[in-house]
Image: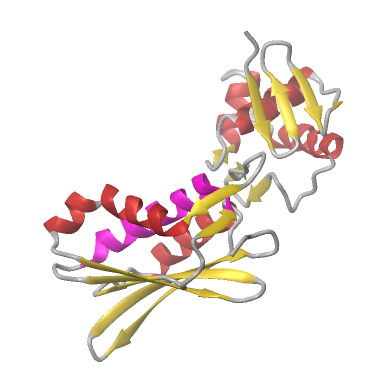
Amino acid sequence: MPNIIHYADLQVDTTTRQTLQSGKEVTLTDTEYRLLLYLLRHQGVVCRRNEIIENIWGERFHYDTGTLDVHLSSLRHKLGWTKEGPIQTIRGVGFILPHKASATGIVKIDSFLRELLMNHEEALRHKNIRCYLSLTPFVYEIQTDENILQEIFSSIFSLFLQHAPDKARWEITSQLTLREYTLTATSTGSCPDFAEINTARQQAAFLGIPIRMGNTHTPEGPVMGVELSIPMEDNKS
């Protein structure tokens, strides 16, 4: 039975090793195919150069990053991809292929967020954290990739929980414009250092959704805020 991997307009059959892009076959060398397959199987994960080399050529292969760059460049060229993406270079570390669905779907945003908060219910109850949802009226569904959205918010909530004191207050609000649907999450008492915020911001950028993060001090204490924007071009309101 064929095992098919889909990524945007790509379709890779791991049984026949056939690669199709928009229905047309792309001829890849054995090395290019294995490189593509490795990245597809590690979507959303930063793949270190030495890990890729060991997986493609074996542990005894002479560590030559130039060889990897040559094959990666050829793969990008054949797929019509550029250095800007989808395969992104993490300077001094390796590469990452962000998660990307073959098609976006409709996400019922209110129930999505409530279910996600329920998944953290035990940890929230343990710290006696209060959560408030205040979403834009009449916007019940947005068109986006639910897996990406879930990964982003899971990371946000984990960061909040790591720094939130007992009896912290979480609030999630939304704002709708003609161009985008913006979700903002804040947590009182949370104030991670810049390095942690910057890391989370980079991870979100890899997933393809613009995100802004920061912390501030108010009379009530420190507050951490996260804001992400989802384009509304194809969304239904």
Q: How is the image coloured?
A: secondary structure
117 shown above or below 221: above
The residue range painted magenta reads 144-164
Q: Assign the N terminus to one quadrant of the image.
A: top right
**Residue at the location (57% across, 33% down)?**
50
Residue 114: image quadrant is bottom left
List the single residue furthest toward the bottom. 219
Q: Residue at x 82, y 36 (%)?
A: 79
Q: Does the rendering let one see residue 62? A: no
Residue 149 sits inside the magenta stretch: yes
Residue at 54 percent of width and 43 percent of height: 44
Percent position of residue 104, x then y: 62, 46
Q: Nearer the viewer, residue 223 or 88?
A: 223
Tell me the quarter of the picture where residue 19 sits.
top right
* Picture quarter with the C terminus: bottom right
Write down the quadrant of residue 73 in the picture.
top right
| Residue closest to the eye, 61 or 18 | 18
How far across and down, in percent of the image, does residue 205 sit? Answer: 57, 58
Q: Is residue 229 left or right of residue 135?
A: right
93 vs 29: above or below: below
- Above or below, 232 against 78 in this view is below
Is 212 positioned to the left or the right of 166 in the image? right
Within the magenta stretch, is there residue 18? Answer: no
Q: Relative to residue 117, is residue 173 drawn left or right?
A: right
Query: Can the viewer see residue 74?
Result: yes
Q: Residue 176: x and y, percent?
A: 56, 74
Q: Main secondary structure of the magenta part?
A: helix
Counting the numbered discs, the total is 0
Q: Which residue lies furthest to the top in this view?
A: 1
- Left/right of residue 132 with respect to residue 178 in the rendered view: left
